């Protein structure tokens, strides 16, 4: 058990290193750096000016070295300007001497850098936006998981009946409608002038501060609906399989009521498989979060990602990517460990 | 001229789809008549869900094929005075012509754009899925069959890609800047090699005893494959038959790249299961080589789940392409792509919902069809 955890965490760390390096490489491509230079300096810089700016700001070191600096495992660069003779460095803040600056300043030291778009410290931005998205995700989970489990259990309880058929059809329908389709249809039905229902609001900007039923329902339902079908189908398959087991028949023959069998014997075993699916839905929801937050103008994590990409905000994009990758890896680990605890048949040596 | 009523709009749209109805009728009639001889496809007709899915999918495939005959107007041309006009509005200055589903924000015909959009989706999604399957199969078979270090290494790589949030990968990979660095070229250079490797392995493992036939097949694969490869991956086809727009190549490669690790995992799992069967042991006792066993014993017996996954994956790829279009990644701004049209339409959704709705229903029905088809196929293939 312990060795499994250690090995699993080791693989996770290695994966995290590889992924962050890939992200670092892809965000620091030459054209992006040139764009960055021109937005930092001015738009009419000549090519040589761009090159010297990049040189003076440490962007011309080997990629591995820069990755190490950014991560905080390599000492930050220092450099004396060839003309003015002024000493600068990655870790040197304006107004402090180079001797006072720390040697390392990267992700691990909590130095996430400054965002160009929002003109603020990235760690603060990421924390704030994650809070908004966390609220959205919590609401989505509260709607999605119970709904999916109930649909799946009822459908799988009596396989092949009309209830099963119609619930399965519903599940297939929801898995076929991505968020940008559901969202658009919902906005038209529930908030446009044309249909005239106007029950809910088409934007969720106000929901960041004050989430009400009116402004939060549409984004939550849009996001939940796409996942519901998938989890429900998994639950149904798992439930249908459990219902054919010998011990269910034994319990029935003993004279136990159908409802009692379902609740006492079937549910426990039928919910193991959906558990992993639900946990793994979290990274899967990330795409949906980006779409829904853009669609409903809810300024959370996904919205920040779009802003960072759109404005070539390299440091912010890196920070957002690291958080996203971290979330994915941690959920995978949790799903593995949880599965092991829940399923007595699996023993990892 | 009067604006058309709802009933008139419906009849006119149904009329425009005439080639599709005829095609559908012919295909379904032939399939029902010959279903005894058509194997799994024929048995699909005993599952109502499968038939419903098949009809939806065929509808969009035929629409893509006959798109030129179906459209009522050019999907790019803007007619003055038709901006955001409601469905059934008569075209100004043209007698007897109507914008059946209205005009969009740039005064283009919504109906024609939806019809032409099916071409964009159906040109990329199945082909990208097929490539992803070639990659997944070529790597998944040996990983599952041999196990050991090869398996550990390949599985680690696959998990690496799978741990990448899809949307982030797209935002990083499908940008105009990245084309200048050649990353898509490298990716396409690697990924497009796999179909050639797959077919070479397929033929050499089977026809080793018949050198004449083998030579012909290998030569044909190398010439055809190399020709297509040079054109698609590097745009260096001397005859200019195979050509891919750099934007399209970027999308295509990214979609293949995202899908292949999942296929790899499925194939690997199936192989681990199937290699313990008696017929594999029999083939090995006969002295067959590993690649023969993998490609001609294991793979055919894994076809059921793979076909089902293929259908599901085309649907998933369609959703991905829509997502890309929704964020305006990699598509030209004028393209009739459904995702892009939805994104353009959503800006005026509260006032003019009609430009955004047709592509949403189109995308939904195509994916629904593919999912239903997969469900029907799964049911029928489990009956064996």
Image: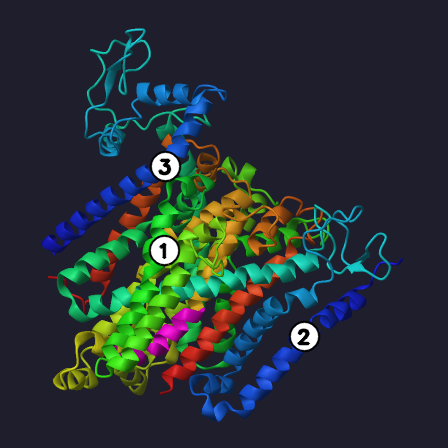
Looking at the picture, tell me which residue is in the foreground, A47 or A312.
A47
The picture places residue A228, in percent across and down from the top left corner, at: 45, 61
Region in magenta: B296-311
In the image, residue A132 sits, relative to residue A190, either above or below, namely above
**Residue at the outermost right position:** B1
Residue B307 among magenta residues: yes
Residue at label 3?
A27
| Residues at discs 3 and 2 in contact (Cβ within 8 Å) | no
Task: Give the quadrant of the C terminus of chain A.
Answer: bottom left
The residue drawn where x is 34% and y is 66% is: B195
The residue drawn where x is 37% and y is 33% is: A30
Question: Mark 2 or mark 1, which is nearer the start of the sequence?
Answer: 2
The residue drawn where x is 53% and y is 82% is: B48
User: Can you tell which mark lies on residue A334?
Assistant: none
Please tell me in which quadrant of the rendered image residue B183 appears.
top left
Q: Is mark 3 on a helix, strand or loop?
A: helix
Please tell me in which quadrant of the rendered image residue B178 appears.
top left
In the image, residue A64 sits, relative to residue B306, either above or below, namely above
User: Can you tell which mark lies on residue B257?
Assistant: 1
How is the protein colored in the picture? rainbow
Q: Would you say B346 lies left or right of B95 here? A: left
**Do callouts 3 and 2 point to residues on the same chain?**
no
Number of residue marks = 3
Task: Give the quadrant of the N terminus of chain A.
Answer: bottom left
Q: Distance between the residues labelled 1 and 3?
A: 18 Å
Residue at label 2?
B19
The residue drawn where x is 23% and y is 34% is: A64
The picture places residue A91, in percent across and down from the top left corner, at: 26, 19
């Amino acid at each position: 058990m312990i060795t499994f955890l250690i090995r699993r965490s080791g693989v996770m760390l290695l994966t995290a290193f590889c992924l962050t390096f890939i992200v670092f490489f892809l965000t620091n491509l030459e054209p992006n750096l040139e764009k960055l230079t021109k937005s930092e300096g001015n738009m009419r810089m000549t090519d040589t000016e761009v090159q010297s700016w990049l040189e003076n700001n440490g962007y011309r070191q080997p990629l591995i070295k820069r990755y190490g600096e950014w991560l905080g495992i390599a000492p930050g660069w220092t450099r004396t300007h060839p003309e003015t003779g002024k000493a600068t460095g990655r870790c040197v803040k304006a107004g402090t001497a180079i001797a006072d600056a720390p040697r390392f300043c990267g992700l691990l030291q909590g130095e996430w850098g400054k965002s160009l778009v929002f003109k603020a410290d990235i760690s603060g931005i990421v924390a704030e936006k994650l809070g908004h998205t966390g609220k959205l995700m919590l609401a989505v989970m509260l709607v999605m998981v119970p709904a999916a489990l109930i649909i799946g259990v009822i459908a799988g309880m009596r396989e092949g009946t009309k209830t099963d058929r119609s619930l399965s059809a519903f599940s297939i329908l929801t898995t076929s409608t991505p968020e940008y389709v559901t969202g658009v249809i919902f906005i038209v039905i529930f908030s446009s002038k044309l249909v005239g229902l106007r029950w809910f609001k088409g934007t969720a900007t106000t929901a960041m501060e004050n989430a009400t039923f009116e402004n939060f329902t549409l984004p939550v339902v849009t996001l939940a609906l796409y996942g519901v079908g998938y989890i429900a189908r998994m639950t149904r398959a798992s439930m249908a399989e459990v219902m054919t087991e010998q011990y269910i028949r034994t319990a029935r023959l003993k004279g136990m009521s159908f409802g009692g069998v379902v609740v006492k014997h079937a549910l426990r075993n039928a919910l193991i498989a959906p558990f992993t699916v639900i946990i793994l839905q979290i990274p899967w929801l990330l795409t949906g979060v980006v779409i829904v937050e853009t669609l409903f103008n809810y300024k959370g994590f996904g919205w920040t990602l779009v802003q960072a990409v759109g404005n070539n905000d390299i440091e912010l994009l890196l920070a957002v990517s690291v958080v996203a990758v971290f979330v994915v890896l941690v959920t995978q680990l949790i799903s593995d460990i949880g599965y092991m605890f829940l399923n007595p048949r699996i023993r990892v040596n | 001229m009067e604006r058309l009523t709802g009933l008139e709009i419906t009849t006119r749209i149904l009329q425009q789809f005439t080639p599709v109805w005829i095609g559908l009728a012919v295909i379904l009639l032939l399939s029902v008549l010959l279903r005894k001889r058509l194997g799994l496809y024929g048995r699909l007709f005993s599952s109502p869900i499968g038939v419903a899915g098949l009809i939806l999918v065929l509808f969009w495939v035929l629409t893509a094929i006959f798109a030129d005959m179906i459209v009522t107007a050019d999907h790019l041309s803007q007619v003055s005075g038709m901006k955001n006009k409601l469905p059934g509005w008569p075209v100004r200055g043209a007698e007897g012509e109507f914008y059946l589903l209205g005009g969009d924000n740039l005064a283009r015909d919504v109906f024609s754009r939806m019809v032409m959009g099916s071409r964009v989706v159906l040109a990329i999604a199945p082909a990208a899925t097929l490539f992803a399957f070639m990659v997944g199969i070529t790597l998944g078979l040996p990983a599952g069959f041999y196990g050991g270090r090869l398996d550990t290494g390949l599985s680690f790589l696959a998990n690496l890609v799978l741990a990448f949030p899809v949307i982030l990968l797209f935002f990083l990979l499908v940008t105009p800047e990245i084309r200048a660095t050649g990353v898509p070229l490298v990716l396409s250079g690697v990924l497009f090699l796999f179909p050639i490797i797959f077919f070479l392995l397929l033929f050499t493992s089977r026809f080793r005893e018949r050198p004449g036939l083998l030579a012909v097949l290998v030569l044909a694969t190398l010439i055809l494959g190399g020709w297509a490869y040079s054109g698609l991956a590097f745009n260096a086809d001397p005859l200019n038959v195979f050509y891919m727009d750099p934007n399209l190549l970027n999308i295509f490669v990214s979609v293949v790249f995202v899908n292949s690790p999942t296929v790899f995992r499925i194939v690997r799992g199936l192989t681990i299961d199937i290699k313990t069967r008696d017929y594999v042991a029999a083939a090995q006792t006969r002295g067959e080589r590993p690649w023969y066993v993998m490609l001609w014993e294991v793979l055919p017996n894994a076809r059921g789940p793979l076909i089902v996954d293929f259908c599901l994956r085309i649907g998933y790829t369609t959703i991905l392409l829509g997502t890309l279009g929704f964020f305006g990644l990699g598509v030209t701004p004028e393209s009739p792509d459904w995702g892009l049209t939805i994104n353009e339409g959503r800006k005026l959704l509260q006032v003019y919902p009609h430009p955004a709705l047709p592509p949403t229903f189109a995308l939904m029905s195509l994916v629904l069809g593919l999912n239903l088809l997969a469900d029907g196929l799964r049911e029928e293939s489990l009956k064996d």
